[in-house]
C-alpha cells in the first residue's frame, strides 16, 4: 500500500527478474519507483476512461498482459496493496494464463484491510468483522450482526450499477444510510477510512454520524467502518450443549493414579 514500505523481498525479486512488468498502482510516484527496479514497466492506468465500463477496461488489461505471456516472456503484474483484494484483473489474468497452460501464481501483499486494522486498532477476532463491497451490499439482502464490525469497501461509488462512474452522490448514499439504520442507530459514529500510500502522508480516519454520511467527502477508495452498536448476545442453549459435551468427555477419560515406586523396583 505504501510506497517502498510494504513490498516483500519475493515480490521485489519477481519485479526485478521479469522480462516485462505491468503496473496498476496508486500514484505516479509509485510507477517511477517501479521503473527504478525494472526498465520495462507498462502502466495499466491508460485503459481507464470516463464513461467506459470498468468491465471492458479489465478485459483489455488482461489481454495486454496475456499477449506478452504468449510471446514467451516472463510477465509480472504489480498491483498496489494485495494483488488479490479488489483486483479483478490479477485474478482474471492468472486464471486465463493457467487455462492456456502457463504457470502463474500470486504473491500476497499488504492490503488496505491490513492497514485499517493497524491504524484503527481493530482486532477482528474480538467481536468479529464483516466485509462487503458497498454497492453489492445495497444490491443484495445480507444478514448483518451489529455486535460485530462492519466494513464497506468503495463507499465512494456506492449504488453504481453501470461500472462506469468514479463517484456517486448524496442521493444514493442516503439509500445506503436507510438500509444501515435498519440495524444501526442514525446517530451511530462511523469511520471514513483511507490508507496512506506515501510515507509523507497520513491515513484518513474521519469519524462522522451515520446520518451525516451522505454529505461527507468520499472518494472511490474510501472505506466505511461501522464499529459494533450492540453487545454480544450469549447463546444459552449452545453453551449448555458445550458443557454437556465437556462433561461426557471428562467421564470417558480414564484417570491413571501415579503411585510411588517401591525402593529397588
Image (cartoon, grey):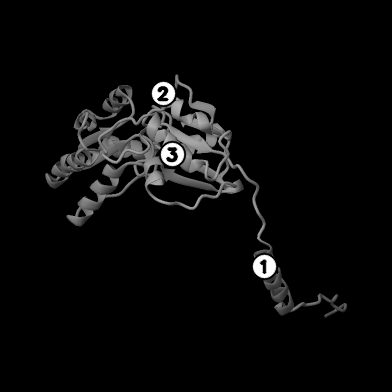
Give the percent coordinates (x, y) of residue 126: 61, 47
106 sits left or right of 180 in the view: left
- Tag in front: 1 or 3: 3
Residue that numbered label 2 is attached to: 198
Q: Residue at x 24, y 30 (%)?
A: 45
Res 122 quadrant in image? top right
Q: How far is disc 1 from disc 2 in space, using C-alphas? A: 49 Å
Instruction: Of the two numbered discs 3 and 2 on the same chain, state the one appearing first in sequence.
Output: 3
Q: How far is disc 1 from disc 3 in space, using C-alphas? A: 39 Å
Q: Are marks 1 and 3 in contact (CB under 8 Å)?
A: no
Q: Residue at x 51, y 37 (%)?
A: 225
Is 262 above or below relative to 239?
A: below
Q: Are marks 3 and 2 in contact (CB under 8 Å)?
A: no
Q: How far is disc 3 from disc 2 in space, using C-alphas? A: 31 Å
Name the mark on residue 112: none
Instruction: Of the two numbered discs 1 and 3 on the same chain, state the one appearing first in sequence.
Output: 3
Residue 111 visible in rendering = no
Is 110 above or below relative to 200?
A: below
The quadrant the N terminus occupies is top left
Name the mark on residue 176: 3
Amino acid at each position: 500500500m505504501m510506497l517502498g514500505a510494504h513490498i516483500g523481498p519475493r515480490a521485489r525479486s519477481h519485479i526485478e527478474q521479469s522480462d516485462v512488468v505491468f503496473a496498476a498502482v496508486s500514484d505516479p510516484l509509485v510507477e517511477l519507483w517501479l521503473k527504478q527496479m525494472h526498465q520495462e514497466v507498462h502502466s495499466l492506468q491508460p485503459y481507464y476512461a470516463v464513461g467506459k465500463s470498468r468491465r471492458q477496461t479489465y478485459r483489455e488489461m488482461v489481454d495486454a498482459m496475456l499477449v506478452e505471456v504468449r510471446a514467451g516472456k516472463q510477465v509480472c503484474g504489480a498491483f498496489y496493496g494485495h494483488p488479490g483484494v479488489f483486483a479483478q484483473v490479477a485474478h482474471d489474468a492468472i486464471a486465463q494464463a493457467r487455462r492456456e497452460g502457463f504457470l502463474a501464481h500470486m504473491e500476497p501483499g499488504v492490503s488496505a484491510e491490513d492497514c485499517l486494522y493497524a491504524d484503527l486498532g481493530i482486532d477482528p477476532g474480538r467481536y468479529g468483522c464483516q466485509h462487503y463491497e458497498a454497492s453489492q451490499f445495497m444490491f443484495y439482502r445480507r444478514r448483518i450482526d451489529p455486535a460485530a464490525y462492519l466494513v464497506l469497501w468503495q463507499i465512494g461509488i456506492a449504488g453504481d450499477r453501470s461500472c462506469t462512474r468514479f463517484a456517486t452522490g448524496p442521493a444514493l448514499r442516503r439509500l445506503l444510510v436507510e438500509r444501515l439504520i435498519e440495524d444501526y442507530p442514525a446517530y451511530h459514529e462511523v469511520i471514513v477510512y483511507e490508507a496512506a500510500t506515501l510515507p509523507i502522508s497520513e491515513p484518513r480516519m474521519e469519524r462522522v454520524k451515520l446520518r451525516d454520511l451522505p454529505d461527507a467527502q468520499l472518494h472511490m477508495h474510501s472505506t466505511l467502518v461501522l464499529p459494533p452498536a450492540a453487545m454480544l448476545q450469549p447463546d444459552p442453549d449452545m453453551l449448555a450443549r458445550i458443557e454437556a459435551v465437556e462433561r461426557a468427555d471428562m467421564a470417558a477419560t480414564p484417570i491413571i493414579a501415579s503411585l510411588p515406586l517401591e525402593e529397588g523396583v
